[in-house]
Image (cartoon, rainbow, N blue to C red):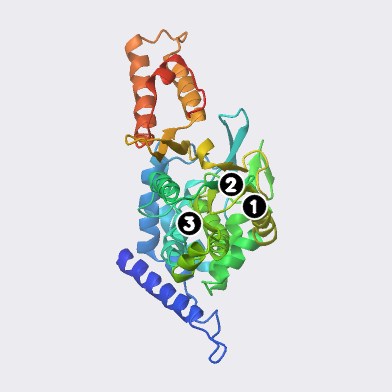
Amino acid sequence: MNLEEVQRRLWEQSHAQKRNREAGTPLFPTNRYDGRIRNLMDLMHNPAWIAAACDRVLKRSRGKVAGVDGVRVREFERNREGRLEELRLELKRGTYRPLPLRRVEIPKPNGKIRQLGIPCLRDKIVQEAIRMALEPIFEVEFHDSSYGFRPNRSTHHAVYRCQQMARSGFTWVIEGDVKACFDEISHKAILRCVREKVMDHKFLTLIQRLLTGGVEIDGVRHPTTKGVPQGGVASPLLANIVLNKLDWFLHSKGSHGAARAKRASHGQPNIRFVRYADDWCVCLTRSNRQQAERLMDEIRDFLRETCGLELSAEKTRITHLRDGYDFLGFNISLGVGRTGALVPKIKVGRKAITNIQARLGEALRYRPTQESISVRLVRSSAVIRGWSNYFKVAHLNFRRFQTGQVARYR
């Protein structure tokens, strides 16, 4: 089986279904569900498909925490063929049941705890097989302003898009964040959105089983009635599928093409947005704070009614571009350029500088194991390398970085 060819055909069929859905007119109405993808469950138990999913999972999972069964990559590889065949037959016969997730807690920079749900390797393989099938189907539907967990897109692309909007005159900004998105997202919303593109009851049942597989805490299995696990392979894609509804809702609030030029000529407001997973920002031009507040209320109502989600009160706010706003660790604001004119600038956010200082302090800290200074320097160099690669597109004032001053950039 040629996996790329299969995914290409899934993409083409999904694209044809989208054209059919959007071509309906009052004179010749069409069923919006015609052309949905069928027989995806056949891919889940295809030997070549599940073997490819296994290769990807094992490559990413080396050195990672094991699931509740305690099976690590090295142990799985000892009897890889037998384990894969057993898993494939369970999927084919409909007897597959996921094991509960392993609960892992990691500290967040703000002092809170992030709860991860770690699947075992066999469940990761099933999730990867699902992701491989759904990704080409829903890439057709995803909005161009969505950048999180998508092929050939990154945080840098999202930040550059914000800079482009600032250069185009979008001044008022709604900094948005969905409250506990991965923990609170509705299972009904996920299945409803997938059902719009997929007509395969067995495949949908498989997704539902993974969503409701439960989590193990102190040896006790607890059911999961909402949310997707942070740490799951398919979780980012499933969240994107639901939040894509928000993207197109925001798209409908703006004007495009000839309508955009007409609104601009009359001095009427317009909006654009950028979303990276559950972090997003909406930019308005020829507008004011009152209009931004009304739009934020509409977004809050839409998320609550359509996705079962709430806006984060502490992270969602309205600001003006001249004051700057934070997005994905960067700070985007207006600054004086070389010619003396105001231009949008990308800088490192205050929290990012505070975090790197804390991480470097931990990496260089003396330990009772009597580590040499060279060992600590190697560890700190790895921290700096990863941090600098992420923020390489931003301007950094090294004086503030070295002295620990994280005053607001002006």
Mark identifier at residue 296: 1
x 32%, y 12%: residue: 374
Q: Is mark 1 on a helix, strand or loop?
A: helix
Front of the two marks 2 and 3: 2
Label 1 to label 2: alpha-carbon separation: 9 Å
**Mark toward the start of the polypeptide (1 vs 3):** 3
Horizontal arrangement in the rendering, residue 221 relative to residue 12 (left or right): right
Query: Vertically, is 25 above or below 343?
Result: below
x 48%, y 64%: residue: 265
x 53%, y 36%: residue: 323
Q: Mark 2 points at which residue?
A: 176
Query: Vertically, is 241 above or below 195?
Result: above
Front of the two marks 1 and 2: 1
Front of the two marks 1 and 3: 1
Q: What element carries label 2?
A: strand
The residue type indicated by label 3 comes to: Val
Q: How many marks?
A: 3
> On the image, which quarter does residue 42 sit in?
bottom left
Dots 2 and 3: beta carbons under 8 Å? no
